Amino acid sequence: MKIFNNSFTVSTNKRCDMVDITGKVEKALADSGISDGEVIIYCPHTTAAITINENADPDVVHDILLTLSELVPQNRDGYKHSEGNSDAHVKSSIVGCSETVIITGGQMQLGTWQGIYFCEFDGPRKRTVNVRITGQ
């Protein structure tokens, strides 16, 4: 079994943003030389996340961010975290910090309309995404 580790940066422009990183993960996969296995995409930040969702219609990203903002408002009575970004921590926990994708024949087995997104909830910032690819 081979293991390939990679990381890349993502810059965000808004407080809440979703950036399609599918191409960067595909580049890491191509660089790895691994044709069958799995890729883990991991975000080492407590106010950001990784998710898989539709990447064909930008309205999907809008709707996800709108819904998260309604469910977890930025300013809410009762938050105690002193940095003023409690909502970002909650959104990160809801969405999750990683995704795993199966690799077959050198290709990620994403659905037709699926892409991998870096989700920013406390930007704008420059962030790191870690990628680990294992297999043959």
Image (cartoon, rainbow, N blue to C red):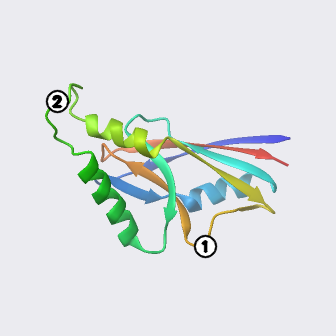
For label 2, the residue is: 78
Left or right of residue 33: residue 70 = left
Q: Residue 100: image x %, image y %?
A: 63, 48
For label 1, the residue is: 112
The residue at 69%/62% (across/down) is 109
The residue at 33%/46% (across/down) is 121
Element on which disc 1 rests: loop
Give the residue type at disc 1.
Answer: Thr
Q: Quadrant of the N terminus?
A: top right
Q: Residue 13: image x %, image y %?
A: 31, 54
Q: Residue 63: image x %, image y %?
A: 33, 64
Checking the image for residue 23, the label placed there is none
Left or right of residue 135: residue 51 = left
Give the residue type at disc 2.
Answer: Gly
Which mark is nearer the camera, 2 or 1? 2
The image shows residue 134, relative to residue 117, as above or below, that is above
